[in-house]
C-alpha cells in the first residue's frame, strides 16, 4: 500500500488550488445567507474539467480512464482553496452518484446522451433515494414503478434531494418488485419535463446553503424503458457502488477544509493577544490545536486508504464506513474547536468561521448517518 502521490497528481492538485483561488469569491456570506447557488461557479468548474473527473474522455471526461486517486486529491485541493463548502459537496454528489453509475451500468445510448452534458455543466444531475418514510431504512421506500408497454409508470415522492429544485436528470430509485426486498429496487433516469414529474422549491437548511435542496414528485409519470439504468432489481447494487466512491471524494473536500481551518486557526491564535501574550501560549488553546491536527491526519489516512482500495478495484465497505464516521464527526469537533479558539470572532458570521460548523453537521446525516456507519462496522465484525 503506497500513499505517496506522483508528480502529475500533485501538480493537478496545485492547479485546482490555483483555479479556486483565482476564480471564486473571497466571501460567500451573501450566498450563504440567501441560499444562492452560483451557476457561474458551476460552469467555471465544468470548463476547468472538474465534473469530468468521474467520466472518461470518450464521454467528455477529463482523462482516458477515471482516476479515483487524482479525483480525491483534486477535491481535497478544492475544499482547501474554496470557501464555499457547498460547491465541492454538490460537485461530488453529481459526479459519483449520477455520472459514475451511468458510466458503470448505463447503455451506450445513455452514456452518450447524458455524460457529455453533465461534464460540460449543461445538465445538472440528482441522486434520489430518500423518501418521507424511508431514510436509513431504505427498504421501506414507497415509490413504485409499474411495467407498461414501452416503459414504466412511476408514483411516489423523494425528499432531501441535492439539486432537486434545478436538476435536469434524476437517478431515481424505486420498487419494481416489492416482494423481494432490496433485490426489487430498480434505478431510472428521469428527465426534467417528463409529464407527471415535478420538483419542489429550495428548502432552507442549517448549512451547505449554497446548494439547492428539496423534494421530487412522481404522479403517473411515464419513463421509457430506455431510461431504466441497468437491469430490474439492480438498484441496490448501483447505489452501494456509487456511495463507496462518493465517500472518497465528497469527504476529501471536507478534509481540505479542515486543513485550511487548522492553518487559519493557528494564524489567529498566534496573533491574538490576551494578558500581554499570544493566546497560542495558553495550554487550553494549544491543546485544541493539537486535537485538530490529530483529527486531520487520522482522517487523511483513512481517506487515502479508501481511495487506494477503490483504485485497486477492491471492496471497501468496512473502510468506507469507518472513513465516513471518522471524518464527518471530526469535522464537527474541529469546527467547534476553531470557534472556541477564535472566541467572539469565531461566533460572528462576518468572519466566516462559524459557517464551517453549520456546514459540517450535514456530514453525519447524508450518505448514511453516523449510526448507520456504526451498524455497518459492527455487522462486518460479526456482531
Image (tube, grey):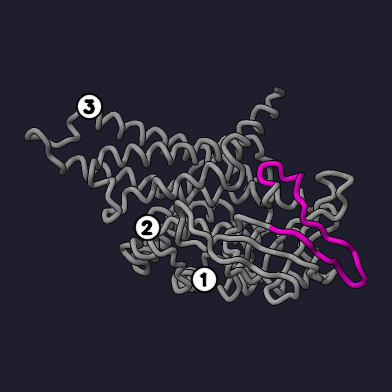
Q: Which residue is mark 3?
A: 283
Can residue 103 be seen in the rendering of this structure?
no
What residue is at 39 percent from the left and 60 percent from the top?
Answer: 32
Q: Position of residue 156 (x, y in %)?
A: 75, 59
- Above or below 324: residue 186: below
Q: Which mark is residue 14?
A: none
Q: Position of residue 51 (x, y in %)?
A: 55, 65
Q: Secondary structure at mark 2?
A: loop
* Magenta extent: 134-157
Can residue 344 be seen in the rendering of this structure?
yes
Q: CA distance from mark 1 to mark 3?
A: 45 Å
Frontmost of labels 1 and 3 is: 3
Give the farthest residue toward the left: 276
Q: Which residue is mark 1?
A: 46
For the residues bearing labels 2 and 3, Cβ distance under 8 angstroms: no
What residue is at 83 percent from the left and 60 percent from the top?
Answer: 145
Q: Which residue is mark 2?
A: 83
Using the image as rendered, state which of residue 143 and residue 259 is in the foreground. Answer: 143
Q: Earlier in the sequence, mark 2 or mark 3?
A: 2
Which quadrant is home to the N terminus? top right
For the residues bearing labels 1 and 2, Cβ distance under 8 angstroms: no
Q: Earlier in the sequence, mark 1 or mark 3?
A: 1
Using the image as rendered, state which of residue 123 and residue 203 is in the foreground. Answer: 203
Frontmost of labels 1 and 2 is: 2
| Magenta-drawn stretch contains 141 | yes
Residue count near mark 1 (Cα–Cα under 10 Å), binned few <14, some 14–19, many ≥20: many
Amino acid at each position: 500500500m503506497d500513499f505517496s502521490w506522483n508528480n502529475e497528481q500533485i501538480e493537478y492538485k496545485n492547479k485546482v488550488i490555483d483555479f479556486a483561488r483565482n476564480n471564486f469569491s473571497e466571501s460567500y456570506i451573501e450566498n450563504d445567507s440567501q441560499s444562492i447557488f452560483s451557476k457561474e461557479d458551476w460552469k467555471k468548474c465544468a470548463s476547468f474539467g472538474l465534473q469530468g473527473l468521474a467520466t472518461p474522455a470518450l464521454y467528455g471526461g477529463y482523462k482516458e480512464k477515471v482516476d479515483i486517486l487524482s479525483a480525491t486529491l483534486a477535491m481535497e485541493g478544492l475544499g482547501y482553496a474554496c470557501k464555499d463548502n457547498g460547491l465541492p459537496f454538490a460537485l461530488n454528489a453529481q459526479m459519483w452518484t449520477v455520472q459514475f453509475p451511468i458510466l458503470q451500468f448505463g447503455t451506450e445510448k445513455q452514456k452518450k446522451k447524458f455524460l457529455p452534458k453533465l461534464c460540460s455543466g449543461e445538465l445538472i444531475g440528482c441522486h434520489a433515494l430518500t423518501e418521507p418514510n424511508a431514510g436509513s431504512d431504505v427498504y421501506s421506500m414507497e415509490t413504485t414503478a409499474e411495467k407498461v408497454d414501452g416503459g414504466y409508470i412511476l408514483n411516489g415522492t423523494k425528499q432531501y434531494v441535492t439539486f432537486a429544485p434545478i436538476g435536469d436528470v434524476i437517478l431515481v430509485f424505486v420498487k419494481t418488485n416489492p416482494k423481494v426486498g432490496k433485490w426489487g429496487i430498480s434505478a431510472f433516469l428521469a428527465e426534467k419535463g417528463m409529464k407527471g414529474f415535478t420538483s419542489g422549491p429550495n428548502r432552507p437548511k442549517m448549512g451547505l446553503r449554497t446548494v439547492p435542496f428539496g423534494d421530487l414528485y412522481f404522479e403517473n409519470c411515464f419513463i421509457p424503458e430506455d431510461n431504466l439504468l441497468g437491469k430490474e432489481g439492480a438498484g441496490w447494487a448501483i447505489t452501494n457502488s456509487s456511495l463507496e466512491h462518493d465517500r472518497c471524494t465528497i469527504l476529501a473536500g471536507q478534509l481540505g477544509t479542515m486543513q485550511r481551518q487548522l492553518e487559519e486557526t493557528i494564524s489567529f491564535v498566534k496573533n491574538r493577544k490576551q494578558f500581554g501574550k499570544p493566546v497560542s501560549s495558553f495550554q487550553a488553546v494549544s491543546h485544541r490545536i493539537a486535537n485538530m491536527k490529530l483529527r486531520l491526519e487520522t482522517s487523511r489516512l483513512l481517506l487515502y486508504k479508501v481511495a487506494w482500495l477503490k483504485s485497486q478495484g477492491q471492496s471497501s465497505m468496512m473502510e468506507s464506513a469507518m472513513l465516513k464516521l471518522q471524518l464527518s464527526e471530526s469535522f464537527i469537533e474541529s469546527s467547534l474547536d476553531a470557534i472556541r479558539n477564535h472566541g467572539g470572532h469565531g461566533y460572528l458570521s462576518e468572519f466566516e468561521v462559524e459557517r464551517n460548523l453549520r456546514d459540517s453537521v450535514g456530514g453525519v446525516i447524508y450518505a448514511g448517518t453516523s449510526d448507520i456507519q456504526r451498524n455497518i462496522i459492527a455487522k462486518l465484525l460479526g456482531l
